[in-house]
Image (cartoon, rainbow, N blue to C red):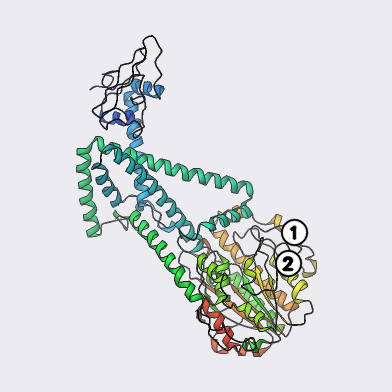
Amino acid sequence: MGAGTGTGTRTGAGTGTDASTADAGADASTGSADASAADASADTSTGTSIGTADTRTVPTPAPDGGTGEKAAPQATPGTPAKPPRFARLTRWQAEHPQGARALSRTITVLAAILVVCTLVMPATIVDLGPARFFRLPGEAIVGAAILLALPRKPRVVLAAVSGVALAALTVLNWLDMGFKQYLGRTFNLVLDWSLLGDAQSYLEDSLGRTATLAATAGLIVLVLLLFASVAYAVVRLSNVLARHSAAATRGTLIAGVVWITCSSFGVQLAGVPLAADSAAVTLQSQTERVSDTLKDEAEFQKVAKVDAFGATPPAQLVPDLRGKDMIFTFIESYGRSAIEDPIMAPGVDKTLAVRTEALKKAGYHAKSGWLTSATYGGSSWLGHSTTLSGLWVSNQQRYRTVMASDHLSLTKVFKKSGAWDTVGVMPGVQKGWPEQSFFGLDKVYNAFELGYKGPKFSWSTMPDQYTLEQFQRRVHGKKHDKPVMSEVILTSSHQPWGPIPKMVGWDELGDGSIFKGIEAAGNKPADVIADTTKSRQEYGKSIQYSVTALTEWLERYGSKDTVLVFLGDHQPIARVSGNHASRDVPISIVAKDPKVLDKISAWGWSDGLRPAHDAPVWKMNLFRDRFLTAYGSTPHPKKG
């Protein structure tokens, strides 16, 4: 069976059939038996011949190889034969048998590498490393044993389906990597698809529409290519196994024994277990995650119906704050790392110390502590709703459940009391916001209602200083029949932290046009994103800016009846805060009236704007009830 023999006879390379060896490399498409020459590129690896294309007018019928296939139909004498599929490739293979054999083997090796890499791929970026990919996947051994036992058609179908499933599992691994890096948690197959749209919007704001569309198109092509490549790779390998079934069976048994031995004795390579079952573990964890999510939805609906202050009469809600202008402010991504990380902390701590002294000179005093956020790296609305609802709102399903309930939010407490007007200032809101009802806000100023004519700063629609000046002009500085409770969301410290606004004279803010030069001279988002150290430095500067803007506003416009509660919604992404950072965020209460802070003296919070390292840490959902209790609210539980 030397190369180049049997042309037109053994291989059936006649021009009248699509099932001939002319269809090279299509392992699963010909419908002929495994022992036939249907997969020309794979056959070359065994040393058998690859027939040259038969160009005679009357083609030789191809044998059925014992598979029951019908022979190729005869062409009518004198009529030109239909050219074979991939005729040029077949001709090249016949003319260069050694090159064809080398190409076939290379493709097979690459297919094996691709399958192994997808099987052993970790689900976190920090675990990526060469040692992770030099492992023996148990799933491959089990899969090989099953494929060897199946007839051809079921084998090809199962191989193709397995390849698609393996590609899907790889995509889920990639999503897990991204979510852990940015949100500190794994991807939720049930709840998190909507966040992909938010991610695209974020990229568009940060990098521009053209770059985002190009990145999106590239990602779609990459995913489709992954599915096609992995499916083809598994089918190809299954055909190779079938053609060499005896050797493949022995190899599978040996590999199984090696895997069991390595697993039993804990054999490691560079600190990584040699026996791998990563794909099985990922599949199990995804399945459990889906099951837990569905159970959690039903259980949380019951929890959300129970409210310690749900039936409290209006007159018994926060009586000790009557007459005060209350301001609840969330600073985007203001986390514990900003105060304690060696790169960010020096600048942020200095700002907190300077602003504490400035407020003290203006007659204000502050107490600060820590809250553990329900989210990390993003999904700010989960932090907001957890703080204000008193419920642990850690995912999108819980958020939807809470927003649809009549659970009493902390901001709605002031509306229910009848003693306050309620307002929201939300520069990050750029579309309809039905949550306004849950938070009990009479009026909400969104990004389009604050008169801003300056440039966006990446995702942030306007600088915090401008937002606060508009809050003063439209809300706090106006005369009201009642005191005002306000919820203000500051956005300048939102990633990617480039460019960052700078403080300007309060009297120079105007319509925000003054920021055009500052934005143009700032860092480009892509430059900050690409450099971890720079991201951390610029993040720290953004927190300094937001804290300075907020406390300068209070120093400039506050009164003896102004009470400011401000906190972070979550820690910044892991690239900035670190892979093992806590979920803690600082919280401060600032007031001129000493009675306001006397009410929380038992909390053990630190004096000033910087909470001490050992200051009390509470889960974020506990703040609502402790705050209401401290300021005189009487519990009247509502159940079910």
Question: Is disc 2 surrounded by few (<14), some (14 to 19) or many (20+) residues within 10 Å?
Answer: many
Q: In the image shown, does 466 or 441 lie closer to the viewer? A: 441
- List x then y, in percent, for residue 310: 56, 82
Left/right placement of residue 449 relative to residue 587 reads right
| SS category of the residue bearing label 2 | helix
The quarter in which the N terminus is drawn is top left
Viewer-proximal residue among 135 and 112: 112
Q: Are marks 2 and 1 in contact (CB under 8 Å)?
A: yes
Residue located farthest toward the top when viewing the structure as drawn: 78
- First in sequence: mark 2 vs mark 1: 1
User: Circle 1 is placed at which residue position?
Assistant: 454
Residue ID for mark 2: 466
Is 290 rendered above or below residue 367? above
Percent coordinates x, y for residue 589 in the rendering:
62, 81
> Within 10 Å of the Cα at label 1, are there few (<14), some (14-19), or many (20+) other Cα atoms?
many
The part of the image, by quadrant, that contains residue 424 is bottom right
Q: Nearer the viewer, residue 351 or 322?
A: 322
Q: Amino acid at mark 2?
A: Tyr
Nearest the eye: 525 or 397: 397
Residue displayed at 35% across by 24% down: 93
C-alpha separation, residue under disc 2 versus residue under disc 1 = 10 Å
Please report the residue visible at 23 percent of the width from the left and 40 percent of the height from the top: 248
Left or right, residue 471 beside residue 175: right
Q: Is residue 348 left or right of residue 521?
A: left
- Residue 566 shows in this picture: yes
